Image (cartoon, coloured by chain):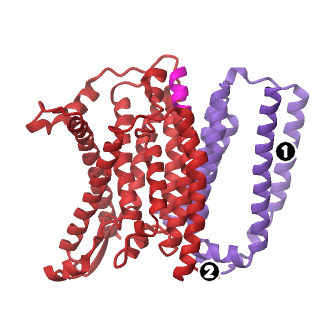
Chain colours: A purple, B red
Amino acid sequence: MLGYTITQWLFGTLSLMAIMFALMMVFTRSPVNSALYLIMTFFCISGHYLLLNAQFLAIVQIVVYAGAIMVLFLYIIMLMNLNADEEPRKHVVTRAIAGLIGGMLLFVMVGALKGAEQLQIVQGGSSQIGLVKNLGKVLFSEFLFPFEIASILLLAALVGAIMIGKRDTNINVK
Amino acid sequence: MTGFIIYKAIMCVGVFVLLLASAAYATLWERKFAAFLQDRKGPSRAGWGGLLQPVADGVKMFMKEEIIPNVSNRSLFILGPCLFMVTAVVTSSVVPWAKPVTIGGQVYDLQITDINIGVIYLLGVASIGVYGIMIGGWASNNKFALLGAVRASSQMISYEIPMGIALIALIISSGGSLSLKDIVNGQDAGFANIVWQPLGFLIFFICALAETNRAPFDLPECETELVGGYHTEYSSMKLGLFLFAEYINMFISSAVLATLYFGGYNFPFAQEVYASLGLVEGSVMISLIGFGVLLAKIFGFICLFMWIRWTLPRFRYDQLMNLGWKTLLPLSLFNLALTVVVEFFRGNIHF
């Protein structure tokens, strides 16, 4: 079809959808719709992972981000009943500064990507590296130490969250 | 390539029809079973002994007036039940239904797709299933619906965790593959996984009950407190989709339970039976027998689900949360530790 392979078609469609949903997530006024568009963006990105033969990463992206974190986000938004008309209008100076900083970030990213087309792609390892078996082997042998450190970080965050929750109830009891 | 697409399309349509037909007749069987337990007759007017009752129910659902509340978020209101139905159906794509068939030298897997992350895919789809209820409940713009949706989703999120840990223990003891096909084939010659994972099976089964919102965990729809829960505002076929998806979920949960813990399409002394019947590997007959065995197991689990529903009283909401977080979660962690020790002594784990 038009000289493109199926993979290229999929990549094009997925990229277009991901960018479209990401833009809609930013521009929509209603917080619930915004969160839903973000979930769609996650799905598109995990489609990209599938194209790269990283099935484990794709499904974990869905389980963790779309299935757990965004559910909690949506939960809070729904319970607080945030609506588009209640969104506070920001001051002009705040908006100008936000625009400036966003523009600078765009500048940096464009600068970083400039000349990327001349780089040679280094194919490290086999194309099967994203499969769960190979990923697990690498994670538990070569990258064992960073992996454990990351798990301790998560544990600390977990304990911290529980501590914050507990402190609130104590204050209420007093 | 064309042949491959045709074969996959036939598989998809076949599984879809199987799901719809079995879910439709599960509604009839539920009422018949309840009637049997309560010493009644159950639906008996439509068709022979009530056999056309699901058709009558379906026609009734379609003929009802379609009401979309003015104050609701229209697009999300419609999206909710659709999403719930879709997530209920897509789980079936990783279930292996029978042994591969060889026709004309070509091997056909009787499974829609054998991805090597099948077990995590099941968890992923289960976690996505929350969205249908949440979106539907919120978009109704009704306090009862919102509370029902919050209940349903927090219940599903809570029970996903012990379910996931029970699955990890299962994977350790079944040889470390995440593909459902490998897990079934691993139970081909030896024992079914239930022998090594009795506690894991119990945890998984309770979580499956909670994930499908079946009694005694059917708190999201609680007439005395919440009217109809998340589907209070729904009418006509949208309500039908919510109710129907529950039966599809039940069918697929039973299929997954049978596949993971009870050997799927395998049965004891299968090789001897096939040999005595003179069947060769890959023949259609073997697949048919295996499929029949799997269906029988699924039917058994569906009966168990229904038996529980019509026997046990439902939980209170705090009891439900306590059971999930304070009983099942530590129990599943204990099961995981126990599995590691047992597998180490069985020689399946090397350090």
Q: Nearer the viewer, residue A25 or B250?
A: B250
Does residue B268 lie above or below B58 as drawn?
Answer: below
Q: Please report the residue visible at 24 percent of the width from the left and 38 percent of the height from the top.
A: B37
Q: Which amino acid does label 2 sit on?
A: Ser
Q: Position of residue B318 (x, y in %)?
A: 57, 34
Q: Which amino acid does label 1 sit on?
A: Gly
Q: Please report the residue visible at 44 percent of the width from the left and 47 percent of the height from the top.
A: B87
Q: How many labels does the image show?
A: 2
- Disc assigned to residue B24: none
Which tag is nearer the camera, tag 2 or tag 1? 2
Q: Please report the residue visible at 23 percent of the width from the left and 40 percent of the height from the top.
A: B33
Part of the protein shown in magenta? B138-150
Residue B139 located within the stretch drawn in magenta: yes
Q: Which residue, given by chain and number where applicable, does mark 1 sit on?
A: A103
Q: Which residue, given by chain and number where applicable, does mark 2 sit on?
A: A126
Q: Which of B187 and B24 is in front in this view?
A: B187
Q: In which quarter of the image is residue B310?
A: top left
Residue B146 located within the stretch drawn in magenta: yes
Q: Position of residue A76 (x, y in %)?
A: 67, 33
| Residue B345 in the figure: left or right of residue B234 | right
Residue B348 visible in image: no
Mark 1 falls within which chain? A
Q: Please report the residue visible at 47 percent of the width from the left and 33 percent of the height from the top.
A: B219
Dot placed on the residue nearer the N-terminal end, 2 or 1: 1
Magenta-drawn stretch, dominant element (helix, strand or loop): helix
Look at the numbered disc 1 and give the secondary structure of its residue.
helix
